[in-house]
Amino acid sequence: MTKDPLITRLEEIDALMAERLRLRGPTLADKLRKAGRLLPRKVSREAAYLAEAQQFVQTPKMARRIDENRVIAAHQVVAEYLRSVDPKEKRKDRILGVLGIVAFNILLFGGIFIYYLWSRGIV
């Protein structure tokens, strides 16, 4: 496999991880390490293969060991998942989750406080 399409695919995945998951790092392996649970198991496995391919590309002898079909399949799986991730939607979901927890706690402790006042005969 020539280096140009492989490098292009690896750079695309690198850019998508930076853009969609807000991960920083000099290599794909560093970004993958920081991703942790952000990626499903299958996507993480394929991204790990791409990170390994990125390391192999640095050495011409090792670059010959890269399986072109596997890189194409791994690229397709990882890119498809990363394109489906919306950073704005994730941020909105996180904010709504925190607000839901705060609202629940306010209602819970408000109810406990009203019960306390009722049991003392104040209300």
Image (tube, rainbow, N blue to C red):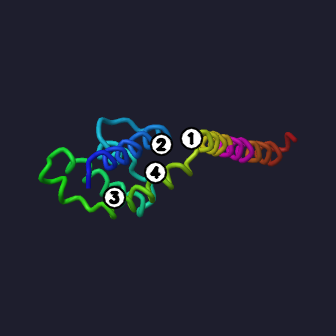
Over which residues does the magenta segment extend? 100-109
Counting from the top left corner in percent of width and height, residue 61 is at 12, 53
Residue at the spot of label 4:
38
Magenta segment, prevailing SS (helix, strand or loop): helix
Which sits in the foreground, 51 or 10?
10
Quick check: is 108 in the magenta stretch?
Answer: yes
Residue type at mark 2: give it: Leu
x and y, in percent, of residue 48 in the image: 31, 55
Q: CA distance from mark 2 to mark 1?
A: 7 Å
Residue at (29%, 50%) from the top-left corner? 51
* Relative to 64, 31 lies left or right: right
User: For this rendering, which residue is in front, 64 or 12?
Assistant: 64
Residue type (three-letter) at the residue carrying disc 4: Leu
Lateral position of residue 23 relative to residue 48, left or right: right
Kindly report which numbered mark, 4 or 2, lies closer to the viewer in this rendering: 2
* Label 1 crowd bin: few (<14), some (14–19), many (20+), radius 10 Å: few
Which residue is identified by label 1? Answer: 87
Q: Nearer the viewer, residue 10 or 100?
A: 10
The mark total stands at 4
Circle 2 sits on which residue? 21
- Does dot 4 land on a helix, a strand or a loop? helix
Label 4 CA crowd tier, 10 Å (few <14, some 14–19, many 20+): few
- Name the residue at 42% across, 59% down: 43
Please say if 80 is above or below 91: below
Is 23 magenta? The answer is: no
Of circles 3 and 4, the one toward us is: 3
Q: Percent position (x, y) of residue 87?
A: 56, 41
Instruction: Single out the mark in the foreground, 3 or 2.
Output: 3
Callout 3 touching callout 2 (CB < 8 Å) = no
The image quarter in which residue 75 lies: bottom left
